[in-house]
Image (cartoon, rainbow, N blue to C red):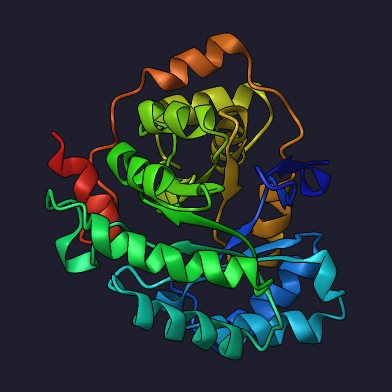
Amino acid sequence: MVLNETYTLSNGVKIPKLGLGTWMIDNKAVVQVVKDALDSGYRHIDTAEAYRNEQGVGRGIKESGVDREAIFVTTKLGGNIKNYDEAVKAIAGSLKRLDMDYIDLMIIHSPQPWENFRDGNHYFEGNLAAWRALEEAYEAGKIRAIGVSNFEKEDLENLINNGKVKPMVNQILAHITNVPTDIIEYSQSHGIVVEAYSPIAHGAILDHPVVKEIAEKYKASPAQLSIRYVLQLGTVALPKSTNKDHMKSNAAVDFTISEEDMNALNELPLIETYGDDEAMPVFKSQHNKK
């Protein structure tokens, strides 16, 4: 069962292959969402300072009755933080809001501040300064693993060549019709586990006719096919849901997509729109490539 499967990070820490994303879930509502996910067998919860729900995530974990040591918790350093002092303060802030002695994985949310996302500036010095704070928290045992999100090859090279600790994770936007193969292969070649956030493209992929057609072959929903797809790319899948039935369905992906169908899915052009999420920097940047 996929909920029991893990990848092993470069430092030996095991990360569950399937996690629950909590982007845009209210701090109060996320308490029950986390409890539902843990009750459904999830053991990997992904949050961020920017989501403004770390406190609720921490409370949900405490109230779930599941041992803290059995749960893999990820949070993220704000993308706007590009200096050491602010990063140190933010790490302490996340620990306090989560009400935890340690965080399993903490990552730099973006190589650029969100208002400058993909503007051509890589903020190398600022990312190294923030990375140094993460390295120190890692070495102090406050964080079990450290990584990045939305980092391109140049951004990774900066930390690999100039940092003391190599990133263990790169969390990126990846879903059917949008697979950044180059960065996935580059990350994996350096022992960096890739995580796929928005594996169902925030719902925008669910009505795709080819996705629906192939899903039917496996007696699966388009969401299940989409999650299985990113797992077969060798990445961690981080679908978001606030519905317990959907959480359970998202975890029922113990089937294998054939090589022929994987190839067919790989060749699909980028979806035309991300709907209401189109204005978000990570989604907007995809269509700016066109």
**In this picture, is 201 found above or below 272?**
below
Count of numbered marks = 0
Name the one closer to the observer, 138 or 274. 138
Residue 100 in which image quadrant? bottom right
Residue 149 in which image quadrant? bottom left
Asked if residue 47 can be seen in this view, the reply is yes
Q: Give residue 17's position: percent from left, percent from top.
A: 69, 45
**Image side of residue 176 versus residue 165, left or right:** left
Name the one closer to the observer, 282 or 138. 138
**Image side of residue 204 versus residue 115, left or right:** right
Q: Give residue 206's position: percent from left, percent from top.
A: 45, 42
**In this picture, is 194 found above or below 186?**
below
Residue at 53% x, 31% y: name it. Answer: 188
**Image side of residue 259 versus residue 120, left or right:** right
Q: Give residue 20's position: percent from left, percent from top.
A: 62, 60
Name the one closer to the observer, 43 or 84. 84
Residue at 72% x, 42% y: name it. Answer: 8
Query: Which quadrant is the N terminus positioned in?
Result: top right
Query: Which quadrant is the C terminus positioned in?
Result: top left
**Image side of residue 268 versus residue 246, left or right:** left
Looking at this rendering, what residue extends furthest in the top direction?
A: 260
Q: Give residue 101's position: percent from left, percent from top.
A: 71, 83
Asked if residue 76 can be seen in this view, the reply is no
Residue at 27% x, 72% y: name it. Answer: 80
